[in-house]
Image (cartoon, rainbow, N blue to C red):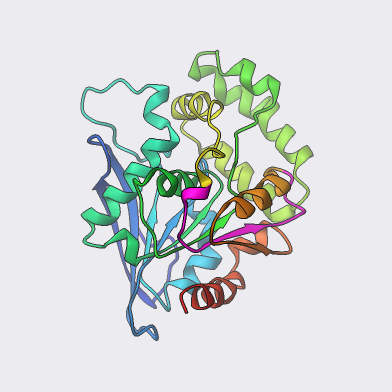
Protein backbone atom coordinates (compact mmCIF):
# COMPACT_ATOMS: atom_id res chain seq x y z
CA UNK A 1 0.00 0.00 0.00
CA UNK A 2 0.98 3.62 -0.36
CA UNK A 3 1.98 5.54 2.74
CA UNK A 4 -1.37 6.68 4.25
CA UNK A 5 0.41 9.69 5.73
CA UNK A 6 1.83 10.83 2.43
CA UNK A 7 4.89 12.10 4.26
CA UNK A 8 8.38 12.72 2.91
CA UNK A 9 9.83 12.79 6.43
CA UNK A 10 9.95 9.03 7.03
CA UNK A 11 10.47 5.72 5.28
CA UNK A 12 7.31 3.60 5.24
CA UNK A 13 6.75 -0.16 5.19
CA UNK A 14 3.58 -2.25 5.39
CA UNK A 15 4.19 -5.65 6.99
CA UNK A 16 2.09 -8.64 7.97
CA UNK A 17 3.75 -9.76 11.18
CA UNK A 18 3.03 -12.96 13.08
CA UNK A 19 1.25 -12.43 16.36
CA UNK A 20 0.01 -15.15 18.70
CA UNK A 21 -1.31 -18.51 17.54
CA UNK A 22 -0.39 -18.13 13.90
CA UNK A 23 -2.36 -14.92 13.28
CA UNK A 24 -0.75 -12.31 11.03
CA UNK A 25 -1.66 -8.69 11.72
CA UNK A 26 -1.14 -5.73 9.42
CA UNK A 27 1.56 -3.55 10.90
CA UNK A 28 2.59 -0.15 9.53
CA UNK A 29 6.12 0.97 10.28
CA UNK A 30 7.59 4.44 9.79
CA UNK A 31 11.27 5.29 10.29
CA UNK A 32 12.26 8.98 10.32
CA UNK A 33 14.77 10.01 7.67
CA UNK A 34 16.17 12.53 10.15
CA UNK A 35 15.52 12.18 13.87
CA UNK A 36 16.04 14.53 16.80
CA UNK A 37 15.61 11.65 19.26
CA UNK A 38 19.06 10.40 20.20
CA UNK A 39 17.67 7.15 21.61
CA UNK A 40 15.67 6.41 18.44
CA UNK A 41 13.20 4.66 20.75
CA UNK A 42 10.08 3.39 18.92
CA UNK A 43 6.57 4.33 19.89
CA UNK A 44 4.05 1.51 19.44
CA UNK A 45 0.55 2.66 18.48
CA UNK A 46 -2.49 0.42 19.06
CA UNK A 47 -5.72 1.91 17.64
CA UNK A 48 -9.18 1.37 19.04
CA UNK A 49 -11.93 -1.09 18.12
CA UNK A 50 -12.39 -1.19 14.30
CA UNK A 51 -10.42 2.09 14.08
CA UNK A 52 -8.79 2.86 10.72
CA UNK A 53 -5.43 4.55 10.22
CA UNK A 54 -6.97 7.51 8.38
CA UNK A 55 -8.39 8.74 11.69
CA UNK A 56 -4.87 9.01 13.13
CA UNK A 57 -3.13 10.79 10.24
CA UNK A 58 -2.64 14.22 11.94
CA UNK A 59 -0.92 12.72 15.00
CA UNK A 60 1.07 10.06 13.14
CA UNK A 61 2.28 12.46 10.44
CA UNK A 62 3.81 14.63 13.16
CA UNK A 63 5.16 11.76 15.26
CA UNK A 64 7.02 10.02 12.42
CA UNK A 65 9.13 13.14 11.94
CA UNK A 66 10.63 12.54 15.39
CA UNK A 67 10.46 8.82 16.22
CA UNK A 68 10.06 5.39 14.65
CA UNK A 69 6.38 4.44 14.82
CA UNK A 70 4.98 0.90 14.85
CA UNK A 71 1.21 0.90 14.22
CA UNK A 72 -0.42 -2.48 14.93
CA UNK A 73 -3.95 -3.34 13.83
CA UNK A 74 -5.80 -5.69 16.19
CA UNK A 75 -7.47 -8.90 15.00
CA UNK A 76 -10.92 -7.52 14.19
CA UNK A 77 -9.50 -5.29 11.43
CA UNK A 78 -10.16 -6.00 7.74
CA UNK A 79 -6.64 -7.02 6.72
CA UNK A 80 -5.89 -9.49 9.52
CA UNK A 81 -4.92 -12.97 8.30
CA UNK A 82 -6.16 -15.84 10.46
CA UNK A 83 -4.39 -19.22 10.38
CA UNK A 84 -5.05 -21.28 7.22
CA UNK A 85 -8.18 -23.38 7.52
CA UNK A 86 -9.13 -21.83 10.85
CA UNK A 87 -12.79 -21.04 11.50
CA UNK A 88 -12.81 -17.84 13.52
CA UNK A 89 -14.58 -17.83 16.87
CA UNK A 90 -15.46 -15.14 19.39
CA UNK A 91 -12.64 -16.31 21.66
CA UNK A 92 -10.11 -15.53 18.92
CA UNK A 93 -10.95 -11.84 19.39
CA UNK A 94 -10.55 -11.72 23.15
CA UNK A 95 -8.63 -9.02 25.01
CA UNK A 96 -6.01 -11.55 26.25
CA UNK A 97 -5.28 -12.55 22.65
CA UNK A 98 -4.82 -8.91 21.61
CA UNK A 99 -2.25 -8.47 24.37
CA UNK A 100 -0.38 -11.62 23.30
CA UNK A 101 -0.36 -10.40 19.69
CA UNK A 102 1.18 -7.06 20.67
CA UNK A 103 4.05 -8.66 22.54
CA UNK A 104 4.76 -11.16 19.75
CA UNK A 105 4.64 -8.61 16.94
CA UNK A 106 6.99 -6.12 18.58
CA UNK A 107 9.44 -8.93 19.36
CA UNK A 108 9.18 -10.29 15.81
CA UNK A 109 10.09 -6.83 14.54
CA UNK A 110 13.29 -7.05 16.59
CA UNK A 111 12.33 -4.79 19.49
CA UNK A 112 12.01 -5.34 23.23
CA UNK A 113 8.47 -4.26 24.24
CA UNK A 114 9.77 -3.06 27.62
CA UNK A 115 12.08 -0.61 25.84
CA UNK A 116 9.27 0.93 23.77
CA UNK A 117 6.85 3.72 24.64
CA UNK A 118 3.25 2.75 23.89
CA UNK A 119 0.25 4.80 22.81
CA UNK A 120 -3.21 3.28 22.49
CA UNK A 121 -6.90 4.07 22.32
CA UNK A 122 -10.05 2.39 23.57
CA UNK A 123 -9.81 -1.39 23.03
CA UNK A 124 -6.08 -0.98 22.38
CA UNK A 125 -5.68 0.73 25.76
CA UNK A 126 -7.63 -2.00 27.55
CA UNK A 127 -5.55 -4.71 25.86
CA UNK A 128 -2.31 -3.10 27.05
CA UNK A 129 -3.63 -2.89 30.62
CA UNK A 130 -4.63 -6.54 30.47
CA UNK A 131 -1.21 -7.62 29.23
CA UNK A 132 0.51 -5.62 31.95
CA UNK A 133 -1.57 -6.97 34.82
CA UNK A 134 -1.29 -10.55 33.55
CA UNK A 135 2.44 -10.28 32.86
CA UNK A 136 2.11 -11.10 29.14
CA UNK A 137 3.26 -7.65 28.00
CA UNK A 138 5.88 -5.17 29.20
CA UNK A 139 6.21 -1.48 28.36
CA UNK A 140 8.59 1.35 29.17
CA UNK A 141 5.63 3.74 29.39
CA UNK A 142 2.04 3.68 28.13
CA UNK A 143 -0.14 6.67 27.28
CA UNK A 144 -3.67 5.27 27.11
CA UNK A 145 -6.59 7.18 25.63
CA UNK A 146 -10.06 6.27 26.92
CA UNK A 147 -9.48 2.69 28.12
CA UNK A 148 -12.62 0.59 28.46
CA UNK A 149 -13.11 -0.87 31.92
CA UNK A 150 -15.99 -2.88 30.47
CA UNK A 151 -17.70 -2.97 27.09
CA UNK A 152 -21.26 -1.81 27.72
CA UNK A 153 -23.09 -2.17 24.43
CA UNK A 154 -26.66 -0.88 24.01
CA UNK A 155 -29.30 -3.58 24.49
CA UNK A 156 -30.27 -3.45 20.82
CA UNK A 157 -26.65 -4.19 19.87
CA UNK A 158 -26.48 -7.15 22.27
CA UNK A 159 -29.71 -8.46 20.75
CA UNK A 160 -28.39 -8.07 17.20
CA UNK A 161 -25.17 -9.93 17.99
CA UNK A 162 -27.19 -13.14 17.73
CA UNK A 163 -28.05 -12.45 14.07
CA UNK A 164 -25.96 -13.78 11.15
CA UNK A 165 -23.11 -11.41 10.30
CA UNK A 166 -24.41 -10.78 6.76
CA UNK A 167 -27.40 -8.82 8.07
CA UNK A 168 -25.05 -6.31 9.72
CA UNK A 169 -24.41 -3.98 6.72
CA UNK A 170 -28.05 -2.78 6.44
CA UNK A 171 -28.33 -2.65 10.23
CA UNK A 172 -25.22 -0.44 10.37
CA UNK A 173 -26.69 1.93 7.78
CA UNK A 174 -30.20 2.03 9.25
CA UNK A 175 -29.58 1.81 13.01
CA UNK A 176 -25.97 1.88 14.21
CA UNK A 177 -24.65 4.88 12.28
CA UNK A 178 -27.73 7.09 12.98
CA UNK A 179 -27.55 6.07 16.67
CA UNK A 180 -23.86 6.97 16.84
CA UNK A 181 -24.44 10.32 15.12
CA UNK A 182 -27.17 11.12 17.62
CA UNK A 183 -25.14 10.08 20.67
CA UNK A 184 -21.72 11.57 19.79
CA UNK A 185 -21.37 15.35 20.15
CA UNK A 186 -17.77 15.89 19.01
CA UNK A 187 -17.80 16.54 15.21
CA UNK A 188 -14.38 14.98 14.61
CA UNK A 189 -15.23 11.90 16.64
CA UNK A 190 -18.54 11.58 14.78
CA UNK A 191 -16.73 11.58 11.41
CA UNK A 192 -14.16 9.02 12.56
CA UNK A 193 -16.73 6.58 13.95
CA UNK A 194 -18.89 6.84 10.85
CA UNK A 195 -15.84 5.95 8.76
CA UNK A 196 -14.91 2.99 10.94
CA UNK A 197 -18.45 1.58 10.97
CA UNK A 198 -18.67 1.76 7.19
CA UNK A 199 -15.32 0.01 6.76
CA UNK A 200 -15.57 -2.62 9.50
CA UNK A 201 -15.31 -6.35 8.77
CA UNK A 202 -18.86 -7.29 9.79
CA UNK A 203 -18.12 -10.94 10.49
CA UNK A 204 -15.28 -10.03 12.84
CA UNK A 205 -17.26 -7.14 14.31
CA UNK A 206 -19.88 -9.63 15.48
CA UNK A 207 -17.32 -12.04 16.94
CA UNK A 208 -15.38 -9.26 18.62
CA UNK A 209 -18.47 -7.67 20.18
CA UNK A 210 -19.57 -11.06 21.58
CA UNK A 211 -16.14 -11.59 23.12
CA UNK A 212 -15.70 -8.07 24.48
CA UNK A 213 -19.03 -7.75 26.25
CA UNK A 214 -18.00 -10.35 28.84
CA UNK A 215 -14.75 -8.57 29.71
CA UNK A 216 -13.88 -6.48 32.78
CA UNK A 217 -10.48 -4.91 33.41
CA UNK A 218 -10.73 -4.28 37.17
CA UNK A 219 -9.24 -7.38 38.76
CA UNK A 220 -5.47 -7.13 39.16
CA UNK A 221 -4.84 -3.51 38.12
CA UNK A 222 -2.85 -2.94 41.31
CA UNK A 223 -0.19 -5.29 39.91
CA UNK A 224 0.68 -2.83 37.12
CA UNK A 225 3.83 -0.91 38.07
CA UNK A 226 4.86 0.71 34.76
CA UNK A 227 4.25 4.46 34.29
CA UNK A 228 0.75 4.80 32.81
CA UNK A 229 -1.05 7.96 31.67
CA UNK A 230 -4.82 7.67 31.37
CA UNK A 231 -6.02 10.29 28.89
CA UNK A 232 -9.66 11.35 29.18
CA UNK A 233 -12.05 13.98 27.80
CA UNK A 234 -15.30 14.90 29.54
CA UNK A 235 -16.97 15.52 26.18
CA UNK A 236 -16.34 11.92 25.08
CA UNK A 237 -19.70 10.18 25.54
CA UNK A 238 -18.63 6.85 24.06
CA UNK A 239 -16.09 6.08 26.80
CA UNK A 240 -16.80 6.17 30.53
CA UNK A 241 -14.90 9.20 31.87
CA UNK A 242 -15.25 8.33 35.58
CA UNK A 243 -14.28 4.69 35.03
CA UNK A 244 -11.10 5.76 33.23
CA UNK A 245 -10.16 8.02 36.13
CA UNK A 246 -10.79 5.16 38.56
CA UNK A 247 -8.48 2.95 36.48
CA UNK A 248 -5.69 5.50 37.00
CA UNK A 249 -6.40 5.50 40.74
CA UNK A 250 -6.02 1.70 40.86
CA UNK A 251 -2.60 1.78 39.20
CA UNK A 252 0.56 2.07 41.27
CA UNK A 253 2.06 4.60 38.86
CA UNK A 254 -0.99 6.01 37.09
CA UNK A 255 -1.71 9.63 36.16
CA UNK A 256 -4.78 11.28 34.62
CA UNK A 257 -4.26 13.58 31.62
CA UNK A 258 -7.35 15.65 30.74
CA UNK A 259 -7.68 16.88 27.15
CA UNK A 260 -10.34 19.11 25.58
CA UNK A 261 -11.86 16.35 23.45
CA UNK A 262 -11.32 12.83 22.12
CA UNK A 263 -10.58 14.37 18.73
CA UNK A 264 -7.79 16.47 20.26
CA UNK A 265 -6.00 13.21 21.14
CA UNK A 266 -5.91 12.36 17.40
CA UNK A 267 -4.26 15.65 16.43
CA UNK A 268 -0.60 16.71 16.26
CA UNK A 269 -1.10 18.97 19.30
CA UNK A 270 -1.24 15.95 21.62
CA UNK A 271 2.29 14.75 20.75
CA UNK A 272 4.23 17.33 22.84
CA UNK A 273 1.92 16.56 25.77
CA UNK A 274 2.69 12.85 25.44
CA UNK A 275 6.43 13.42 25.08
CA UNK A 276 6.51 15.77 28.08
CA UNK A 277 4.70 13.17 30.17
CA UNK A 278 7.11 10.43 29.05
CA UNK A 279 10.08 12.59 30.05
CA UNK A 280 8.59 13.23 33.51
CA UNK A 281 7.58 9.60 33.98
CA UNK A 282 11.06 8.24 33.20
CA UNK A 283 13.22 10.78 35.06
Between 38 and 23, the residue placed more toward the observer is: 38
- Assign the N terminus to one quadrant of the image: bottom left
Q: Is residue 116 above or below residue 100?
A: below
Residue 178 versus residue 195 in the image, above or below: above
Residue at (55, 13) in percent of width and height:
162
The residue stretch that appears in magenta: 222-237
91 displayed left or right of 259: left
The residue shown at (50%, 24%) is: 206
Q: Residue at x 75, y 53 (%)?
A: 186
For residue 89: magenta?
A: no
> From the viewer's perspective, is 254 left or right of 132?
right
- Whether residue 232 appears in magenta in the rendering, the answer is yes
Instruction: Provide residue 21's location: percent of width, then percent of height.
Output: 24, 34
Q: Is residue 194 above or below residue 278?
A: above
Whole-percent x, y for residue 8 in the image: 39, 76
Q: Residue at x 44, y 29 (%)?
A: 204
Give the number of marks.
0
Q: Is residue 167 at least partly visible in the picture?
A: yes
**Foreground of the two, 98 or 87:** 98
Q: Nearer the viewer, residue 85 or 272?
A: 272
Q: Is residue 75 visible?
A: no
Quadrant housing residue 106: bottom left
Q: Is residue 94 above or below residue 158?
A: below
Q: Find the residue positioned furthest to the top.
A: 163
Residue 275 image point, x, y percent: 52, 75
Amino acid sequence: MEDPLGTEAAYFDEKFVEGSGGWYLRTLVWTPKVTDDTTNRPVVVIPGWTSVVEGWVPLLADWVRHRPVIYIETREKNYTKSPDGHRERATDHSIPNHALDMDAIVRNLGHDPSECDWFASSLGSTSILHGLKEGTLSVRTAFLLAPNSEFKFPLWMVFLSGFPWWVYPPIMRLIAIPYMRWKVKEPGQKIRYTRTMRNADMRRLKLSSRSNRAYSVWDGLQKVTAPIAICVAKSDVLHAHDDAIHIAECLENGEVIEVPSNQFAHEAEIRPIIEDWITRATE
